[in-house]
Image: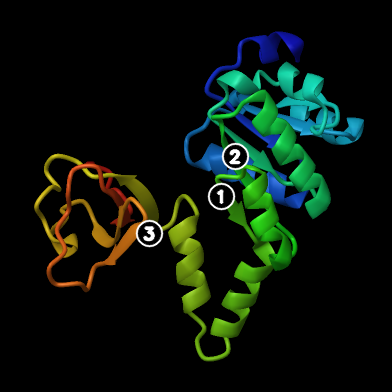
Amino acid sequence: MRLMQAKLEDHVVICGFGHAGRSAAAELVRRGTDKRNVLVIDVSRAVVEAAGEAGYVGLLGDATHEHVLNESRLESAAAVFVCVGRDDTTVLITLTVRHVAPTVRLVAMVREEENEKLVRQSGADATVMPSKVGGILLADSVDTSNLAGYVMDLITAGGRVTLLERDARPEDVGRRPREVRDGLCVRILRGTRVFGFWEPDVRVQTGDRLVVIQPEPTPDD
């Protein structure tokens, strides 16, 4: 494991390998990430051994400690996922990560809505609240049997459609959202401003970020 850790670069560090951490790792693999480029940190030896047996790189330790994060080669990582079960631990890990690697992308799972702002203030680039997402899908399912399935299709790899965020390309500049050729552009992000596809006078500019729904590639693509 130490030899594998020493070779890591542009890898993803997952702090906590419970249900959410395992699901995140599996989805990364489905999207093309090599298992050997996913490093799992957990305080449980059994969990770390299970991660290693599954093909991931395991590191036994507490992610709130700087020396453990240093062993994960955090300074050369592409991203960090914080998937522990307590929001107070999430805040402490986030602060420690930011001390060790100020610029690494950090995504944190939050249990309680009231703690989301605190986690972001601690340095998280993005937060995910599984309970809130699940509640929304449950509520939507009161009137429909298909909406939840379509949302899952959008956000997981291997579905008929994929939701992604990307930089505007030269061929996109000057086009309306509906005219973007590689899919359905549903949102344009320009600094702190957000534009919907229905706004008639909006055109893509250089430097924009686009949220696009793309169909599943055909075998000839």
Rendered position, 169 above or below 134:
above
Element at label 3: loop
What residue is pinned by disc 3? 160
Rendered position, 217 above or below 133:
above
- In the rendered structure, which disc, 3 or 2, sits on the residue that comes first in sequence? 2
What amino acid type is highlighted by mark number 3?
A: Arg
In terms of depth relative to the viewer, which is nearer, 48 or 62? 62
Task: Specify the quadrant of the image occupied by residue 134.
Answer: bottom right
From the top left corner, tell me how far across and down residue 217 is, in percent.
29, 48
Q: Report the residue at 60% width, 84% height from top.
A: 139
Q: Which mark is residue 106?
A: 2
The 10 Å Cα crowd at callout 2, few under 14, some 14 to 19, many 20 or more, is many
Marks 2/1 in contact by CB < 8 Å: the verdict is yes
The 10 Å Cα crowd at callout 1, few under 14, some 14 to 19, many 20 or more, is some
What residue is pinned by disc 1? 126
Q: Report the residue at 68% width, 51% height from top.
A: 119
C-alpha separation, residue under disc 1 versus residue under disc 3: 26 Å
Which circle, 3 or 2, is nearer the viewer?
2
Rendered position, 29 above or below 211:
above
Element at label 2: strand
